[in-house]
Image (cartoon, rainbow, N blue to C red):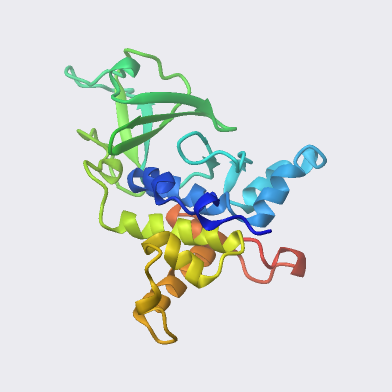
């Protein structure tokens, strides 16, 4: 017997409210972790330990991350390149008023991890997520230079602009609805079931073949599937999937 919609994991919109405060890298993870092939690779990781780096790289990661963890708890080690990751290096020729590296003065809840190549720091506070890559040899109290990929000369910003978000942008609601619709369809829900979960049970008046609500839900479902099956790479600023892969990899992102 099918699970009642009000008990299904995808039905309560409140369970997705955390999505409103996610940055693009966190959103990329939310879409990737739902991919059935990625979840299968995670389950097979112990049997294919020698080839795991290659498997992770195919998904745009240095290391595979547990898909059961949402973006609040996961620490996916993306391949380098995202402009929002601030590079922190010891300043070899600092001015007299050089800014020192002060780990404990960085605002927010801090998480320090090794991403397979170096130390990465994530600092989260309400409405903001700061991401740093720490160069080898950098120590607390050292003069520090900040740099963004693709932003020209090294400079010291007041706040990393790409990640500073005092309030969720309007587009965040689209991501919330897209992820909820994606989870619903992965669970086997019909388009009408999805509409009831996202917009309320009283949808009959707008539910007809050419109705606006039906078209909106269909677009959300298609968008979610596209982001899960490779579109997340754009969010993570990764190169598109190479064409001409073998048939076995054709459905991989």
Residue 54 versus residue 215: which sits nearer the camera? 215
- The location of residue 97, given as percent across then percent down, is 17, 18
Above or below, 7 relative to 178? above
Residue at image coords 44%, 25%: 111
Above or below, 84 relative to 253? above
Total number of numbered labels? 0
| Quarter holding residue 139 | top left
Q: Quadrant of the C terminus?
A: bottom right
- The location of residue 53, given as percent across then percent down, is 69, 42
Q: Residue furthest left?
A: 97
Residue at image coords 22%, 35%: 157
Q: Quadrant of the N terminus?
A: bottom right
- The location of residue 126, given as percent across then percent down, is 28, 34
| Quarter holding residue 68 | top right
Q: Residue furthest right?
A: 47
Q: Is residue 6 visible?
A: yes
Q: Is residue 25 visible?
A: no
Left/right placement of residue 143 relative to residue 185 reads left
Residue at image coords 37%, 68%: 202
Residue 161 versus residue 36: which sits nearer the camera? 36
| Quarter holding residue 101 | top left
- The location of residue 23, given as percent across then percent down, is 37, 46
Residue at image coords 64%, 59%: 2
Q: Residue furthest top?
A: 141
Residue 75 versus residue 114: which sits nearer the camera? 75
Left/right placement of residue 11 relative to residue 41 reads left
């Amino acid at each position: 017997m099918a699970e009642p919609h009000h008990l299904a994991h995808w039905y309560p919109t409140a369970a997705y409210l955390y999505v409103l405060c996610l940055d693009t890298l966190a959103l990329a993870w939310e879409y990737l972790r739902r991919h059935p092939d990625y979840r299968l690779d995670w389950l097979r990781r112990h049997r294919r330990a020698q080839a795991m780096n290659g498997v992770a790289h195919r998904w745009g990661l240095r290391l595979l991350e547990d898909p059961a963890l949402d973006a609040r708890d996961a620490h996916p080690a993306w391949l380098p390149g995202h402009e929002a990751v601030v590079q922190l290096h010891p300043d070899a020729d600092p001015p007299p008023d050089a800014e020192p590296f002060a780990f404990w003065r960085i605002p927010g809840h801090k998480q320090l991890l090794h991403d397979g190549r170096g130390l990465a720091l994530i600092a989260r506070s309400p409405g903001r997520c700061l991401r740093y890559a720490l160069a080898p040899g950098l120590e607390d109290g050292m003069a520090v230079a900040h740099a963004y990929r693709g932003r020209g000369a090294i400079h010291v910003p007041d706040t990393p602009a790409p990640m500073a978000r005092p309030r969720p942008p309007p587009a965040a609601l689209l991501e919330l609805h897209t992820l909820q619709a994606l989870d619903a369809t992965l669970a086997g829900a019909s388009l009408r079931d999805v509409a009831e979960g996202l917009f309320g049970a009283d949808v009959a008046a707008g539910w007809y073949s050419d109705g606006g609500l039906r078209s909106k839900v269909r677009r959300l479902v298609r968008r979610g599937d596209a982001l899960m099956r490779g579109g997340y790479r754009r969010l993570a600023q990764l190169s598109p999937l190479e064409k001409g892969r073998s048939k076995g990899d054709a459905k991989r992102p």
